[in-house]
Image (cartoon, rainbow, N blue to C red):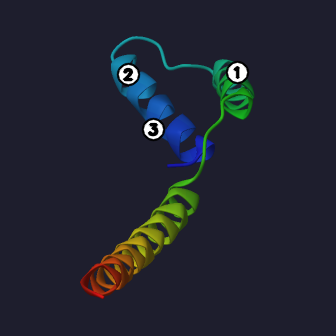
Amino acid sequence: MNADELYKQVSQQLSQTFSGAQAISDEVHGHLRSAMLSTFSKLDLVTREEFDAQRAVLMRSREKIEILEAQLAKLEASLANE
């Protein structure tokens, strides 16, 4: 979920909360959005797509390591038998 989607979700929740009373003005929405985007830009966040891509790289790396470990074990065993 990116910052705009999170802002929209929080904004909808606030609007629902205050729907019985007074609607939140556009100015308050603007200030809230600015504050949230400013805060998010200071955080060390990644998008879901970036996270998923790095996860895929990690999984491929783990698979390669397992294959190399198995090959190393076979070589060590063959050397020990000589």
Choose between 18 and 75: the one closer to the eye: 75
Choose between 21 and 49: the one closer to the eye: 49
Q: Which residue bears the numbered disc 1? A: 35
Graded by Cα atoms within 10 Å as few (under 14), some (14 to 19) or many (20 or more), the crowding at tag 3 reads few
Choose between 73 and 33: the one closer to the eye: 73
- Give whichever of discs 2 and 1 has the lower sequence position: 2
Graded by Cα atoms within 10 Å as few (under 14), some (14 to 19) or many (20 or more), the crowding at tag 1 reads few
- Residue 20, image x, y percentages: 33, 16
The residue drawn where x is 47% and y is 64% is 58
**Which of labels 2 and 1 is toward the front?**
1
Q: CA distance from mark 3 to mark 1?
A: 15 Å
Quadrant assignment for the C terminus: bottom left
- Residue 4, image x, y percentages: 61, 44
| Residue 24 vertical placement versus 5 (above, below) | above
| Residue 79 vertical placement versus 46 (above, below) | below
Left or right: 6, with 39 as reference point: left
- Label 3 residue SS: helix
- Label 1 residue SS: helix
Q: Which residue bears the numbered disc 3? A: 9
- Residue 8, image x, y percentages: 52, 40
Give amino acid for label 3. Gln
Quadrant of residue 31 within the rendered picture = top right
Left or right: 7, with 62 as reference point: right
- Give whichever of discs 3 and 1 has the lower sequence position: 3
- Label 2 residue SS: loop
The residue drawn where x is 37% and y is 22% is 19
Q: CA distance from mark 2 to mark 1?
A: 22 Å
Q: Give residue 19's mark.
A: 2
- Give whichever of discs 3 and 2 has the lower sequence position: 3
Give amino acid for label 2. Ser
Extreme residue in the top direction: 21
**Which of labels 3 and 2 is toward the front?**
3
